[in-house]
Amino acid sequence: MSDNNKIIIFDTTLRDGEQAPGASLNIREKLEIARQLVRLNVDVIEAGFPIASPGDFEAVKTVAQEIRGPIISGLSRSRKQDIERAAEALKYAERGRIHVFLATSKIHMQYKLKKAEDEIIRLAVEAVKYAKSFIEDIEFSPEDASRTELPFLAQVVSAVIDAGASTVNIPDTVGYAIPESYAATIKYLYENVPNIDKAVISVHCHNDLGLATANSLAAVKAGARQVECTINGIGERAGNCSLEEVVMSLRTRKDFFGGLYTDINTKQIIKTSKLVSHLTGFVVQPNKAIVGDNAFAHEAGIHQDGVLKERTTYEIMHPADIGLEESTLVLGKHSGRHAFKDRLEQLGFHLTDAEIEEAFERFKVLADKKKEIFDEDLEIIVEEAFSKTVPQTYSLDYLGVVTGNKSISTATIRLKKDEKVMQDAACGDGPVDAVYQTIERITGIKAELLDYSLRSVSKGKDAIGEVVVKLCVDDKIINGKGVSTDIIEASARAYLNGINKIVRTDGKAGNEPKGI
């Protein structure tokens, strides 16, 4: 390493982040996030797990073809077919990396792999050597390292470095580690792996105990020089280490971390956070560190008085440092295409001429309903334009709801499928339930509603409402999202969005159109 003070930021939003239930992204959405990660200036983008599915392979391949600057990484088990698939997806990358992993903890070796320690070392070495025959840059991860016995972990790390791994990741796969013990693991490896200076030591922490960022920073302090993380901390189970938390911790507490730094363009943090939130459907909690809506909000009178007199009394970071700045360009119904397109580019979106035209028409329709269009409104408009690239089996043609505090809520709905129209009505416990009962009757697809959330995604009494639902169909969990100035319509669109995803991914036929 030429600079031992630089912390390499390895972003795995498109791989581990997308593994969060319901966070599935299509290729266009992955590419849009990857482009924003370039603006954020991450060092490594883990684009996916190529052998996991044809779609994941195509996504990694597309990112490798289109993105220049960061290293593009593809995940692979320690199997030849995995490695070959990753190499095929990455062959067009300007700088590619195969990330190979193999479990090393006793519980994984006994119950999952059913293999002894010497066989694990042999397989790890063979995998690294085979991967290196395709690509020079190889990363190896001993899965569940935080629950692996230290002497054996040191043997594995030494062996894979000798085999050619230039980065060795020490993952806390199940979020089991505590900062002090995790730092001690990194320190142990530096003291007991004789060839450790030939590789970058990386860390990958999960947030099951809410300690992912703390563990990652403790490891950095102990000598690790790469942090694997995701935007907004999304990922498996409770999520991953949050990129924005690590980066801003190092920046804000230079006094503690000494000369350690990252190359992240922090002014792109908010834009990146919002893009990932909108495209995955995962709403950022208001009190989320750095990027939550309340992160720089002050309600208490004492706090407000202090900030007005001197910002640093209650703010340890400046909002502008993460790109949290008010827009000076106000968009309304009199705005033209040029101003519209310019603002979209400022927000990080790059659309084709046809997509711009479609988005502009949607903008004009919304502008007739609202006095002022905010950035959040534009993000919703663009997101809907993206969703148009995916075929919609069912589309909403008409929605009517009768409800009241002393009447039974009834919904009448017309859906289009293959240019044919299907209509039905149903009662429910409230207008939203009536809508969902009706859609179920029309489509014939029974979905269990696991979660429903509603929020305003723009400002004012005429704000756009966004509904996100989590559905379960045949044990498959998927998110649906819908937006409208009418929350009942937004609810219907969210449910239909989820049903359409189920139809596309599982090939469910649903009911055949019978006309009305």
Image (cartoon, rainbow, N blue to C red):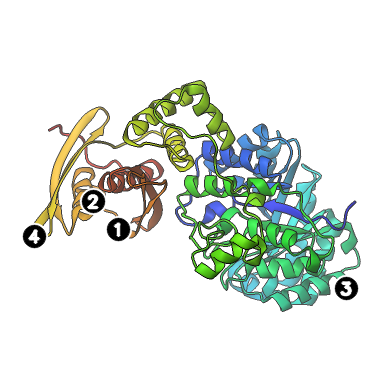
Instruction: Say left or right for 481 vs 140.
Output: left
Query: Distance between the Cα atoms at labels 4 and 2?
Result: 20 Å
Image quadrant assignment for residue 377: top left
Can you give x and y, in whole percent of width and height, for residue 103 in the image?
67, 65
Counting residues from the start of the chain, the first of labels 4 and 1 encountered is: 4
Name which of mark 3 and mark 1 comes first in the sequence: 3
Of the 4 image quadrants, the one containing the C terminus is: top left
Q: Is residue 194 left or right of residue 395?
A: right
Tag 2 residue: 436
- Residue assigned mark 1: 448
Q: Name the secondary structure under disc 3.
A: helix
- The residue depicted at 18 percent of the width and 57 percent of the height is 430
Residue 211, placed above or below residue 198:
below
- Mark 3 surroundings: few (<14), some (14-19) or many (≥20) residues within 10 A: few
Few, some or many residues within 10 Å of mark 4 (<14, 14–19, 20+): few
Residue type at mark 4?
A: Lys
Q: Amino acid at mark 2?
A: Tyr
Question: Of label 4 and label 2, which has the lower sequence position?
Answer: 4
Q: Secondary structure at mark 1?
A: strand
Please state which amino acid type lies under the numbered disc 3: Glu
Residue 25 placed where, x, y %? 50, 44
Q: Secondary structure at mark 4?
A: loop
Per the image, the residue denoted by label 4 is 406
The disc, 1 or 2, on the residue closer to the chain's N-terminal end is 2
Tell whether label 3 touches label 4 (CB within 8 Å): no
Q: Label 3, on which residue? A: 191
Q: Position of residue 173 (x, y in %)?
A: 63, 66
